[in-house]
Amino acid sequence: MEKMNGYLEAGLDDVQFIGICGMGGIGKTTLAKVLYNTLKDQFEASSFLANVREVSVTRGLVPLQEQLLSEVLMERNLIIWDVRKGINLIRWRLCRKRVLVVLDDVDQLEQLQALAGNHDWFGFGSRIIITTRDEHVLKGHGVTNIYKVRGLDYVEALQLFHLKVSKGKQPTDDRVEFSKCVVNYARGLPLAIEVLGSFLCGRSVEEWKSSLNRLQEAPNEKVLKVLRISYDGLDRRDKEIFLDIACFFKGKDEDRVRKKLDSCGFNSDIGIRELLDKSLITIVNNNLWMHDLLQEMGWEIVQERHSDKPGKWSRLWLYKDVYHVLSKNMGTDAVEAIIVDVPEMTQLEAKSFSTMSNLRLLEINNVYPSGNLECFSNNLRYLKWHGYPFNSLPMSFRPEKLLKLNLCSSRIKYLWKGMKPLKELKSMNLSHSCNLIRTPDFTGVPNLERLNLEGCARLLEVHQSVGTLKRLILLNLKDCRNLVSFPKNVCLTKSLKILCLCGCLKLEKLPQDLGEVECLEELDVGGTAIRQIPPSIVQLVNLKIFSLHGCKGQPLKILSSDFFLSLLLPNKNSDSMCLSFPRFTGLSSLQTLDLSDCNLLEGAIPFDIGSLFSLEAIDLSGNNFVSLPSSLNQLSKLKIFCLERCRNLKSLPELPPEIVFVGAEDCTSLETISITPKLSWTADMALNFSNCFKLAGDQVSRDNLMAMLLEQWLLELPNCSSQFHLFIPGNEIPRWFSYWNIGGSVTMQASGLRSDHNFSGFAVCAVLSLPCCTDMSCMEIQCKIEAEEDDYNFSVAIPSFATLKSDHLWLAYLPRETFKTKRFQVLTMASFNIFYVGENFWDAAVKMCGGVPIHTEVEDFVYKGQQLRPPIWNPWPFELRRSGNRKFFTLSWLEGSNAARPALPNEFLGSICKFSRARKINDI
C-alpha cells in the first residue's frame, strides 16, 4: 500500500492516472472501493463506475458517461445522445473540478478514451483510478503508475476465511485442518476464499469434508465463472497458448516453451505477452507459472462437453488418460497434443496413433506399442519419444512442418530410406540409439541446425550430405566408438559452431580443410586416435574452446629392424606417440585449451603457445614433459593452470600475471618455482602443491618457500581485501608463526591492531592429516575467527584429487579488510578453530594450527586502501576426472550472523566453467 499511497500523493496539484492490475478475483475492485471510500471526502466531487466491461457490452458507453457526469455534477436527468458528445461534455464540465473517479473493470482502450481520455479533462489535483485485468490497456492509455495486486499470504488468507465462515471466530478443533485445506486450495485468491467461506458457513463437519472432496474433482463454478472472463477475451491462438501452458508447461523454462509454441505457429512472443498483460500467467526465474485455479480452469475448458471421453479432448497430460486412450484405441482427430511422463514400461496399441490425424505435439517415454506403427500424424511439429521401439519411422510419415525430432535411446536402425522432405526440421536428436549404423540422407533437411548422434556406438558412417547443411550449428558425435571416417565436406558447413568428436576411438584424421569452418567456436576431439592436427586449424579465428583430452593416438607399429634399437634404448617407450601440433599463432580467440593426458613428451608443446593472448584456462595434466615453454608467462589473461600428475615436471616457469589457480598435485619431481617481481599476482590466488615432496623439501626449505610466496604476493597485492591459499606437504607449523598450538585451535593476543596502520592481516596455517581420504572432492575446512564482540567464519575446499601420502600444510592469508565492520571496532584477541566439514572424513584431523599478524613496513610494502569487498573464498571443485569432467574452483564467502554472500566475479567464474566437459547437448 505504500506504493499506492505514493501514486496518490505524488504531485498534489497535478492530475494522476493510477492503474490497479491483477488476475480476476485477486481483489482489485475491493482495493479500489477502500481507496474511494477513504479519499472521496478530500475532493470536490467523486464517481465510482462499477463493472465498466459488463455495462459497455450490454448497454454501451453512453450510460457510463451519463453516470459519471451525474455523480460529479450532482445533476439528474442528464441526456447524452452519442459517445462523441459525451466526451466533449465531460471535458467541458469537469476540467476545472478536482475529482476522484474510479473506473472499475476496464478491458478495452475505447472505454478509457470515452470516459477519461486525457489529463486535461479534469481539474488540478484530480485522481483517476482504473482497475483492469489487462495491463496492456493501461500502457496503451499512457498510464505509468501501475499497482499490481498480489494474492494474500497464508495468514491473511486464513483470517479472511475465518471472517467469512465464522464471522472472525476461531474454528473448532475438528475444522482447523479443513480450514487449512481450503486456504491452501485457494492459493491466496480472495475471491475463492470468500466464495468457499460463504458456502461452508453454518454447515456441518461432514458437509465440509464432502465439499473439499468435491473440490478435488472439480473447481467451484462461481470462481471459474469469474476467472474465465479473461480467457474468453483472448484471441484464438492466445487461447491455445494458455491451454498448452495450463496442461503441459506450467513451471517449465520459458525459452524452451516458446520454441515448442512457435513450432505450432502460435507466435509466442505476442501470445505470452498478452497472457502476462491479462495476469493469466507470470514468469519467475525464466519459468512460466500460473495460479492453480487458473490451471484447473484450463483443464476444465479442455474437458468440457466430453468430460468422460478423453479421446475427444484436445490435450492429454495425465498418464491414466493417455493409457485409457492408447490402450483402447480411442484416439480421435480432436487430440492435438500428448505430453506425459510414463512412469514404467507400458505396452499400448500402435494403431492408436493412426486415428489422431491432428496431433501436433507428442512427447512420451517408456511406451512400447504392440503391432506395427503404420502411420503418424503428418501434422506433427514436435516429436519426442524416448526409447522409440521401432526400427524406423513409418514410410508414410511426411511431417512437412516438423521442427524438432528427438528419438534418443531408440531402437532405430535407419531413420528413413532415400530422401525425405522435411524443410522445417531444425533439430534432430538420435543420441544413444545403439542400433543406428548409418545416418539418413540429409538432402531434404536443408534447415537443420542441431544434429546429436552422441553414444551411437554402432554408427559407422555419417552421410556425405551433412556437408550440404548450410545452417548446421551443432554436430555432436561424442562416443561414436566405431566411427572410422568423418565426412570431408563438413568443411562446407560454414555456420558450424560446435563440433564434438570426443570418444570416437577409431577416428584417426580430421579434414585437412577444417580451418575453413570459419564460425567454429568449440572443438572437442578428446579420446580419439588422431595423431596430427591439420595446419589449417590456425585459421579458426573464432575458436574459443579446444580439447584434446586423452588424445594419445594409436600405438606406433615397430618394424622388426627397430626391435633391436628398442633393446638398446630401453627408456624409449614404444607406445609413446607425441601428438603433432601446428603453430598456435592465429587462434586469437582461444580461451580454453585442454591437452591433458595426451602423453606429451619434452618439447611437444609448441614454443609459440604464448601467442594465445585470449587464453584463460589451460590443462596440461597427466603428461610426461620435464619443463614447460618459457613463453607461458606471455599468456596475459591466463587464470587457471592445471598440471596435476605431471610426474616428470621439474620446474615451473614464470607464471602469467593474471593467474588465480595453479593445480600441480602429484607433480612428484617438481623442485623449483620461478617467482619474479614482474607478476601482478591478481586479487585472489590458490596454489595446490599436494604430494610435491621435492618442492617442499625439509622444514627450513619449506618455511622459506611459504614465506617467499606469501611475501611476493603481498608485495604485488592489488587490493587489501584479497586472500592467498597454499596447500603443500608438511607436518610442522612454519617457525615464523608466533602463535601455534597442538590440535585445531589457537589463541592470539592481538591488541592494538586497529590503530596499527602497518597491520595488513592475519596468516593462518594448519597441519592436516588425511589418512583415509582418497577422494577429496567434498572436503571442506572451516576456520572461525573470534574477537571481543563478533566472530567470522570462512571455509575453503582443498582442490586435490590425489591420494595424500602424508600430512599437508594449508596456509591462508586473511586481509585486514576482513575485520572492518562496525562491530569490530576493537580487536584485542583472535582465536582460530579449524575443523573438517563433510562426509567420509572421520579419520581426518587437524594436528596443529597457528596464526600470526602480518605487518607491512612502510619502507618494504605499499599499503593500498581499497573499498571493502567480502574476501574469503571457498574453492570447490567440479566433478572427478573419472566422470570425464575437469575440476576447478568456485568461490563463496561465509561470515558470522551478519554474513553477506556476493556473487563470484563473472570473468573468473566463466574461466572455470569453460573447463567442464559435461556439456548438456543431449537435450536439444
Image: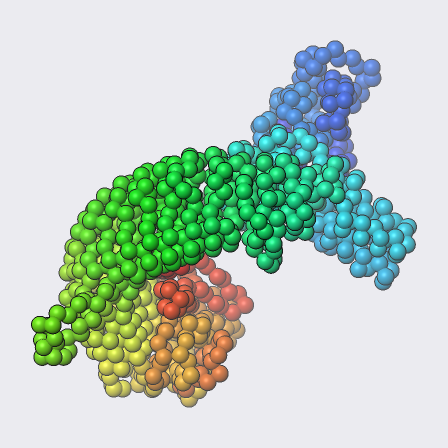
Report which quarter residue 78 is drawn in: top right
Check the image and report above or below for 583 versus 228.
Answer: below
Nearest the eye: 15 or 296 = 296
Percent coordinates x, y for residue 439 in the rendering? 37, 47
Percent across and percent down for residue 238 are 60, 33
Position of residue 129 measured from the top left corner of the image (x, y, whole percent): 68, 31
Q: Is residue 18 above or below residue 81?
A: below
Asked if 704 appears above or below 116 in the picture, the reply is: below
Q: Kindly indicate the quadrant of the structure image that contains residue 355.
A: top right
Q: Residue at x 49, y 68 (%)?
A: 895
Residue 821 in view, yes or no: yes
Q: Closer to the camera, 771 or 358?
A: 358
Residue 503 x %, y %: 33, 60
* Residue in view at x 17 percent, y 51 percent: 535
Residue 909 seen in render: no
Instruction: Quadrant for residue 653, please give it.
Output: bottom left
Question: Would residue 406 appear left or right of 459 to someone viewing this image?
Answer: right
Q: Is residue 897 above or below residue 907?
A: below
Most foreground residue, 275 or 268: 268
